Amino acid sequence: MVTAQQEPDTSGVTAAVETLREALTAAGIVLPSLGADEASPALNLIALGRVRADVALRLADVIQRGCA
């Protein structure tokens, strides 16, 4: 029996990307490459991309303050 391959549901990934982008923007952080990982849509991965060291340090600071 042959079955049609279903397209993965990426709505959760899209919502997660937008929610993360909004939170980062509110913290003054921009990840230019933030988006859905197009290479593996079935896994619902999000690509955070590469960032400069100063941006990574700001991101770490925001996370640390949020965990305190």
Image: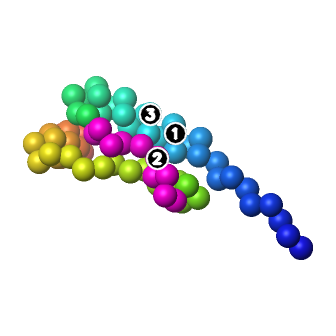
Packing grade of label 3 (10 A; few <14, some 14-19, many >=20) is some
Question: Which label belongs to residue 18?
Answer: 3
Residue with the mark numbered 2: 36
Q: Residue 22, can we see it?
A: yes
Identify which residue is drawn at 42% across, 43% down. 35
Q: What secondary structure is the stretch in magenta mostly built from?
A: loop
The span from disc 3 to disc 1 (Cα, nearest Å) is 6 Å
Comes first in the chain, label 1 or label 2: 1
Magenta-drawn segment: 31-40
Residue at image x 59%, y 41%?
Answer: 11
For label 1, the residue is 14
Q: Position of residue 52 (x, y in %)?
A: 15, 45
Residue 31 shown left or right of residue 36 in the figure: left
Q: Pointers 3 and 1 in contact (CB under 8 A)?
A: yes
Along the horizontal axis of the image, is 47 left or right of 58? right
Q: Could you say which quadrant of the image residue 26 lies in? A: top left
Where does the image place residue 51, in percent across and percent down from the top left? Answer: 20, 46
- Give me the C-alpha separation between circle 3 and circle 2: 10 Å
In the image, 9 versus 65, the foreground residue is: 9
The residue sitting at the top extreme is 26
- Alpha carbon separation for disc pair 1 and 2: 7 Å
User: Looking at the rendering, in which quadrant would you find the N terminus?
Assistant: bottom right
